[in-house]
Image (spheres, coloured by chain):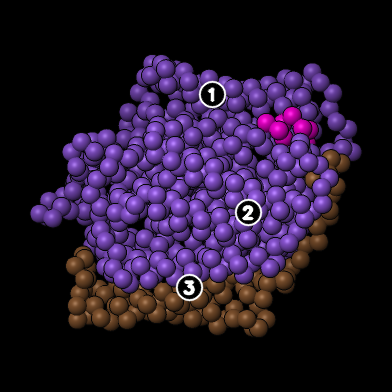
Chain colours: A purple, B brown
């Protein structure tokens, strides 16, 4: 069929993997009547939720922030689920097949420290400032310039990402089940538009929690049955070592001493400082799509606990993503009984073999008959739809609050903004559909759309973190730092695109670096440039008085007590527990 | 829209951790329960049928559809009952 789809996560670069999969011309399987019934039940449920929730969605606070009444568990599951899209699941399962257990870094060091930092350090400021969005916080802290830059870039890219998700779902459905692309695009878009337009963020959050449960229900059988077939983890490691001729595929850290020592072509400094310290913090603490879920929490303690709960669940996700990819290295067989070798997308298109990114559907089909297959496919569809809903609900919030309400129509009645939120949802979905068809005509657009996110996320983290932790940061410093970081990121991206391997060697500091390393180091440099420019410009300009920074910056704010009375109610205690487990897991799989 | 003077609301931190929204008669967890129960009730009979007509998948002898369906039925029923309308949760 010739369509290409880059199976990356639905929102941003931190978790984007480098595989450009070309899905095959022949469909992998068919759904039985039972499978279709399971899929239909899901659609009935989400549409019912949309109509049901509409009754309680009358004010802007209810539409855009779910009334700020979500418990820590709901906000936390929604927070982690907003990132757990089908693109991510399929893409990173493929990466686990290609690179081994190293792919786990994007779930552990590339997520857990940042999520805990958001909950414990940053959330109090987002929450007590009562901002409606991350650009809204920038407006409070740095004024209109930084807010405008962040809001316009975020709104633009979010709506494009929704279209990318839509197209990716359609291609996967065509590849796995033979469905018509236009049918998948329109059914998915109309369903999502209905439930988000009616119920706003509340509807999106409920569906994200449902999706989280569904993904586990649909995918958990793969590692369970796979480990039974492989004879347990120890036997699996031995089989992988035998099949690939190396022990490197099952070690997290011991192979990262050199760029050449691991299949990913990355050094531990790139993982720790690029991915762990910058990319991950940028995504998890400043990307409004995920932060919006936590802003819906009912009180300060729930807002602090939600990312901690999300982090605990995030640590478990490699079980359903990475383990299936590793299992495929050991147990995935051709019909004649020989070991199946998956290949890069372009090779798959030429040879008719299966591509890396098909590993999850292939494993699903291997173990799941009628009914269970429908459950797995429903989980994938739910993941795609929730990706669209997450993007479009974040878009409608930023559009209404930070662009329309800030620059086009200020001081309108609340009802007007709710109405604008509903309309922008519908129009946003139509733009997404247009993007989906655009991507269908020129697949390379998808790569550029996804790269766009990486231009803004790391510098944005620099601006927000200095804004929260450094009283001296000024309005001019915030704006020029963000702009300089963003422009430098675009410049480095263009340099590598035009300069190839030699340019990559300069950015990643090694001639042995692979494209994956470029993202990490570009993030690191653009963040540093943002921070340096912010600091220098701030020192040259006049800061705001402390009285204007109350509720926005450490040192100028008395943070209210979160209400925790016992040890087990304290978010910091649970963050400590998650940290210990996180460290233990990294040592266990060293 | 945004208050430029950064109006600070000193948040009343509730220690009440019920997973329920006062304005919403139906809990989110009730929806989770109903969906899982529905899937369990579809999968379990399929699993029973597969005892005599095993599907052509690897490890069909483990009857995954039956056991998974049973697990989802129990999980779904528990959540449906616990968070049913009027249960006070």
Task: Give the side of residue A344 with respect to residue B69, left or right.
Answer: left
Q: Give me the C-alpha separation between circle 3 and circle 1.
A: 45 Å
Can residue A205 be spotted in the picture?
Answer: no
For residue B25, which quarter of the picture? bottom right
Q: Give me the C-alpha separation between circle 2 and circle 1.
A: 29 Å
Q: Which residue is the site of mark 3?
A: B35
Q: Which residue is the site of mark 1?
A: A490
The disc placed on residue A451 is none
Q: Magenta stretch: give its range.
A: A141-149
10 Å neighbourhood of mark 3: few (<14), some, or many (≥20)? Answer: many
Percent from the top left, x then y, of residue A398? 67, 43
The disc placed on residue A293 is 2
The chain carrying label 2 is: A
Can residue B44 be spotted in the picture?
Answer: yes
The chain carrying label 3 is: B
Which residue occupies 62% across, 73% down? B27
């Amino acid at each position: 069929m010739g369509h290409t789809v880059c199976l990356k996560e639905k929102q941003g670069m931190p978790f984007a993997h480098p595989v450009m999969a070309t899905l095959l011309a022949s469909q992998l399987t068919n759904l039985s009547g039972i499978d279709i019934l399971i899929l239909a039940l899901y659609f009935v449920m989400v549409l019912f939720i949309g109509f049901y929730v509409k009754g309680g969605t009358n004010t802007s606070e209810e539409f855009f922030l779910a009334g700020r009444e979500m418990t820590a568990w709901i906000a936390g599951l929604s927070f982690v689920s907003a990132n757990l899209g089908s693109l991510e699941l399929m893409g990173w399962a493929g990466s686990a097949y290609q690179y081994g257990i190293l792919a786990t870094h994007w779930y552990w060091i590339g997520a857990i420290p940042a999520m805990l930092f958001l909950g414990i350090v940053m959330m109090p400021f987002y929450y007590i400032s009562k901002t409606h969005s991350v650009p809204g916080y920038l407006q409070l802290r740095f004024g209109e310039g930084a807010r405008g830059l962040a809001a316009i870039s975020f709104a633009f890219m979010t709506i494009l990402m929704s279209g990318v998700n839509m197209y990716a779902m359609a291609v996967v459905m065509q590849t796995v089940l033979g469905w018509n692309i236009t049918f998948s695009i329109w059914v998915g878009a109309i369903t999502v538009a209905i439930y988000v337009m009616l119920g706003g963020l509340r509807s999106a959050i409920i569906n994200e929690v449902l999706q989280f449960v569904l993904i586990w229900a649909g995918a958990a059988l793969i590692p369970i049955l796979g480990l039974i077939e492989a004879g347990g983890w120890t036997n699996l490691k031995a089989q992988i070592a035998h099949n690939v001729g190396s022990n490197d595929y099952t070690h997290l850290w011991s192979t990262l001493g050199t760029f050449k020592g691991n299949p990913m072509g990355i050094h531990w400094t790139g993982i720790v400082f690029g991915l762990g310290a910058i990319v991950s913090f940028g995504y998890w603490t400043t990307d409004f799509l995920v932060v919006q879920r936590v802003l819906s929490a009912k009180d300060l303690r729930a807002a602090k606990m939600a990312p901690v709960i999300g982090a605990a669940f995030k640590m478990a996700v490699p079980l359903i993503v990475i383990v299936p990819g590793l299992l495929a290295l050991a147990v995935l067989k051709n019909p004649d009984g020989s070991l199946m070798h998956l290949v890069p997308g372009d090779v798959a298109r030429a040879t008719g073999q299966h591509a890396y990114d098909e590993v999850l559907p292939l494993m699903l089909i291997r173990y799941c008959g009628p009914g269970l297959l429908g459950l797995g496919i429903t989980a994938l569809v739910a993941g795609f739809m929730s990706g669209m809903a997450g993007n479009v609900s974040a878009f409608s919030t930023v559009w209404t609050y930070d662009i329309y309400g800030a620059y086009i129509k200020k001081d309108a009645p609340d009802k007007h903004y709710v109405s604008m939120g509903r309309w922008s949802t519908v129009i946003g979905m139509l733009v997404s559909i247009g993007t989906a068809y655009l991507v269908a005509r020129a697949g390379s657009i998808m790569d550029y759309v996804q790269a766009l996110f990486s231009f803004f996320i790391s510098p944005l983290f620099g601006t927000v973190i200095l804004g929260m932790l450094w009283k001296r940061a000024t309005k001019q410093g915030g704006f020029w730092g963000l702009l300089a970081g963003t422009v430098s990121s675009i410049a480095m991206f263009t340099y590598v695109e035009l300069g190839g391997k030699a340019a990559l060697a300069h950015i990643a500091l090694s001639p042995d670096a692979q494209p994956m390393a470029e993202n990490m180091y570009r993030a690191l440099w653009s963040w540093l440039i943002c921070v340096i420019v912010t600091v220098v410009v701030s020192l040259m300009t006049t800061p705001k008085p402390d009285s204007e920074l109350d509720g926005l910056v450490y040192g100028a704010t008395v943070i209210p007590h979160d209400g925790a009375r016992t040890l087990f109610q304290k978010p910091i205690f649970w963050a400590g527990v998650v940290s210990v487990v996180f460290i233990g897991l990294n040592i266990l799989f060293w | 829209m945004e208050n430029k003077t950064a109006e600070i609301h000193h948040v009343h931190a509730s220690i009440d951790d019920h997973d329920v929204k006062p304005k919403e008669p139906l809990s989110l967890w009730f929806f989770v329960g109903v969906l899982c129960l529905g899937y369990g009730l579809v999968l379990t009979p399929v699993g029973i049928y597969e005892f005599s007509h095993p599907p052509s998948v690897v490890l069909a002898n483990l009857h995954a559809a039956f056991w998974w369906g049973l697990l989802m039925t129990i999980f779904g029923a528990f959540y449906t009952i616990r968070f049913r309308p009027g249960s006070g949760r």
